[in-house]
Amino acid sequence: MKLNVLLLPGDGIGVEVTREAEKVLKHVTSAYGHELAVHQGLLGGIAIHKAGNPFPDETRKLALEADATLMGAVGLPEFDNAPPEKRPERGLLGIRQTLQVYANLRPVRSYKALIDSSPLKNELVDGTDMIIVRELTGGIYYGTPRGISGSGAEERAVNTMTYTRAEIERVSHMAFQLARKRKKKVTSVDKSNVLENSQLWRRVVVEVAGQYSDVALEHILVDNCAMQLVLNPRRFDVVLTENMFGDILSDEGAVLAGSIGMLPSASIGNRRPSGAWTGLYEPVHGSAPDIAGQNKANPLGAIGSVAAMLEYSFGLMEEAAAVNHAMETVLNSGKVTADLKPPGAPAATSEVGDAVCAAIAKAATV
């Protein structure tokens, strides 16, 4: 199989973790006899510096031509006070819209080797295994009108949360289809007690659920969901929610996984004729400029995103499983970065990537 992949390392530690993810991608595709073509583009702060735009036209072209895109992280403190169109994050929103990746899948799993890394009690975290399905191209991040107007005492800011029936339907179908392959349960998150937007969300989700009689549906208000994630995370299987709620709740999942550096994500769009999904893959963590360039960042979220890309965009289930198994082997070995509180000296970013490659190679010879 030929894989055409675009890499967008972005800013800060994005460069370092993407380098290790690319290393693993090259290793696993070679081990399984695939042909890999890799292109690299600019996104975020680095794109502003080099092209004057957080999402240059050349990057847009490359993304549309690629089979899948693997990202690092975007954001730099120097842009914190820049106008919205000149912020690195605008590039991220732009590429999501360009690729029409409307469902963000964020798996949250507790690994036995990392139970002690979570600040929660072991008996609460152990056995956690969920996917948060976040709607990605609608809601308050994209709604209009938006902006800041007026001055002095009359200055005001407006953001608009808006969803159409079609946007809710398509992400709901994604959640129920995933649940069919898991424990057959969807938890839909909303704020329907006060928001009309959430009232439509709940009504449409119920209608979609009627097409999946084999999947159980429950509803939960977003504030209660935030609490239940840390009190009883094992109750969740597939969590379905709108854009902003999903952004917040999925980062809370880092507490369960032991480190935000562990969390991969897959942003999925429409199916191609081959049956594969259009996909944008990235670790959940930010650019962490305070440790950038020091070979300290945890690359496992980025490497896990490679596994997701192999599964969703290329349908390479065995190869995806090989990457995930290699990651677990490395976690069990204790050769991990400082954020995971290893028993001995912490490993460097590059050492973790090398160890994952070695575990894939060893498994392939068994």
Image (spheres, helix red, strand yellow):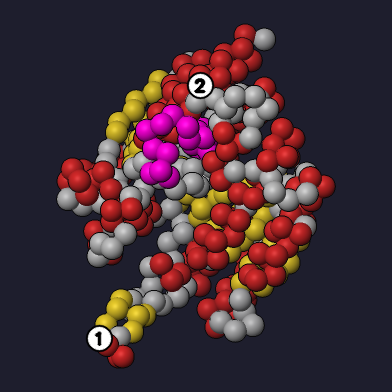
Eyeballing the image, is 64 above or below 87? above
Q: Is residue 111 toward the left or the right of residue 97 in the image?
A: right
Percent across and percent down for residue 5 are 37, 33
Q: Name the residue under label 2.
A: 351
Quadrant for the N terminus, please: top left
Residue pictured at 69% horizontal, 49% vertical: 119
Secondary structure of the residue carrying tag 1 is loop
Name the foreground residue: 75 vs 198.
75
Q: Which amino acid does label 2 sit on?
A: Glu
Q: Is residue 150 toward the left or the right of residue 13 in the image?
A: left
Decide: few, some or many residues near mark 1? Use Cα within 10 Å; few <14, some 14-19, many ≥20.
few
- Based on the displayed image, in which of its 4 quarters is residue 84 positioned? bottom left
Among numbered discs 1 and 2, the one appearing first in the sequence: 1
Magenta stretch in the rendered image = 288-311
Percent across and percent down for residue 320 are 57, 30
Q: Mark 1 points at which residue?
A: 151
